[in-house]
């Protein structure tokens, strides 16, 4: 067993990203494995929020255009910083609104149904908010039965051939996740996009569980649009602003949810009643940007730039490799189902394990300082994050899990989920 600890220490020694751990508020005695729900706070994120508050204090209204971080341009500036993480050009990425609003904004703009092509395709395992948004858009178009969902054969993953097999001339638009929020499966974005385009279908991805953990090449892959949140792997803080990508070829389309911040900046303050749509992704803004919900990203994103998303991906895979190998060996006697795909090509930044007592196990882990999250009915999600988790964190997490399983400590807890889980 000590072999695992030695292996963890050795991996931590060789870790090229180890210096970033000290930049985060980790919590004494805590093994944080929930960075895919809410990333940890870093000193840099804290500082950039304080800096923006200072700008307000010092510049008041002038802060919109004065200082080092003028608020008027902050959505675009943060968009540019995120462009490298999704593989897009400057002017194609924007920080604005929330993921759900961004789905409404992008899909409402790009979904232009006619009598033959009117369906939207998603999947059975999709996140509820994405589905609610798509259904409400279809409802508004009088297409109550317009949503088609790719089925899952095993309850956890999707097959590329099933996705492609369902593409036909009746589908106008596809929205799929890049990484499935439960199983952590990575979809084959490039292949799916190429197949969709062959059928004349517009295709977008929800990157909530991949941005900051997995590199993307959206431009090169030809993806039409994407949306994401920034409070998960990007560590932007609770309720931090969302992001979106819109390929340049769509910039001429009239955006659906119009507002004065989507206007061309040079004429915005002419205050005319005719909308003069901005020429780039900036057009997807609506109202005044939520400056304090963006400010932490100025600091948080610096670390991604410096660390490099490829390094982050390598370490992330090594962390989940280590965790999966340890669970399989040390917990072999227990009935734990390893749900997440093993192959690197199909695994995102977190893993999902199954057990009938999962809610109790989740509560028992929390009582011991391990922070996972529970996913109904019987799963626990664990996300060791490259920027702040160590291999030793993973070691202790699995050892604590082993004690809980050996001693059946989970029986001391309700096998039910909390309000936020
Ligand atoms: C986290 C997440 C969301 C959350 O959307 P918000 O609008 O930020 O609340 C939506 N979709 C997916 C796939 C997510 O993982």
Image (cartoon, grey):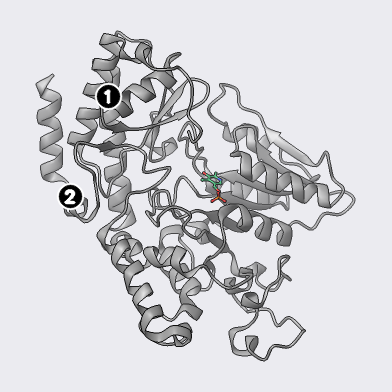
How many labels sit on residues?
A: 2
Secondary element at image label 1: helix
**Which quadrant, please, contains the N terminus?**
top left
User: Which of the two residues, 168 or 406, is positioned nearer the viewer here?
Assistant: 406
* Left or right for 342, reference 148: left
Residue 340 falls in image quadrant:
top left
Using residue 166 as the reference point, say whether residue 14 is left or right of it.
Answer: left
Residue 278 is labelled as none
Q: Where does the image place residue 292, in percent across and percent down from the top left?
A: 44, 67
The residues tagged by marks 1 and 2 sit, at their Cα atoms, a distance apart of: 22 Å
Q: Residue 353 at what x, y percent from top left?
A: 40, 23
Q: Is residue 331 above or below residue 288?
A: above
Seen from this angle, which residue lies furthest right? Answer: 115
Label whose residue precedes the other's in the sequence (1 or 2): 2
- Residue 118 in view of the camera: no
Q: Residues within 10 Å of mark 1 (few under 14, many from 20)?
A: few
- Which label was assigned to residue 18? 2
Residue nearer the viewer, 12 or 361: 361
Which residue occupies 44% across, 74% down?
77
- Rendered residue at 54%/70% (across/down): 289
Nearest to the observer: residue 122 or residue 36: 36
């Amino acid at each position: 067993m000590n072999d695992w600890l030695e292996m963890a220490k050795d991996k931590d020694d060789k870790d090229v990203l180890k210096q970033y751990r000290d930049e985060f508020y980790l919590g004494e005695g805590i093994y944080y494995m929930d960075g895919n729900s809410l990333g940890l706070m870093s000193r840099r994120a804290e500082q950039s929020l304080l800096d923006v508050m200072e700008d307000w204090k010092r510049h008041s209204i002038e802060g919109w255009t004065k200082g080092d971080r003028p608020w008027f341009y902050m959505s675009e500036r943060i968009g540019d910083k995120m462009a490298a993480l999704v593989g897009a050009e400057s002017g194609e990425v924007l920080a604005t609104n929330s993921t759900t609003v961004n789905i409404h904004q992008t899909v409402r703009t790009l979904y232009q149904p006619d009598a033959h092509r009117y369906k939207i395709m998603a999947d059975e395992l999709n996140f509820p908010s994405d589905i609610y948004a798509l259904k409400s858009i279809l409802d508004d178009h009088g297409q109550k039965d317009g949503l088609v969902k790719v089925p899952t054969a095993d309850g956890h993953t999707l097959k590329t051939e099933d996705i492609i097999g369902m593409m036909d001339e009746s589908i106008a638009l596809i929205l799929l996740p890049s990484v499935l929020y439960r199983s952590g499966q990575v979809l084959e974005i490039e292949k799916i996009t190429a197949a969709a385009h062959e059928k004349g279908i517009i295709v977008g991805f929800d990157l909530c569980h991949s941005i900051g953990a997995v590199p993307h090449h959206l431009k090169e892959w030809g993806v039409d649009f994407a949306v994401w949140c920034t409070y998960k792997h990007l560590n932007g803080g609770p309720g931090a602003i969302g992001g979106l990508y819109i390929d340049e070829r769509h910039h001429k389309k009239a955006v659906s949810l119009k507002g004065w911040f989507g206007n061309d900046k040079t004429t915005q303050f002419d205050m005319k009643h005719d909308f003069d749509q901005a020429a780039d992704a900036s057009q997807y803004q609506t109202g005044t940007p939520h400056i304090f919900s963006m400010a932490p990203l100025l600091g948080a994103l610096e670390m991604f730039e410096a660390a490099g998303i490829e390094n982050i991906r390598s370490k992330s895979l090594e962390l989940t490799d280590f965790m999966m190998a340890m669970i399989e060996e040390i917990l072999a006697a227990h009935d734990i189902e390893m749900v997440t795909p093993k192959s690197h090509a199909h695994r995102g930044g977190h893993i999902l394990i199954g057990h009938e007592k999962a809610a109790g196990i989740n509560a028992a882990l929390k009582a011991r300082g391990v922070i996972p999250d529970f996913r109904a009915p019987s799963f626990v999600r664990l996300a060791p994050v490259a920027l702040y988790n160590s291999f030793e964190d993973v070691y202790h997490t699995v050892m604590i899990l082993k004690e809980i399983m050996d001693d059946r400590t989970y029986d001391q807890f309700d096998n039910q989920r909390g309000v936020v889980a």
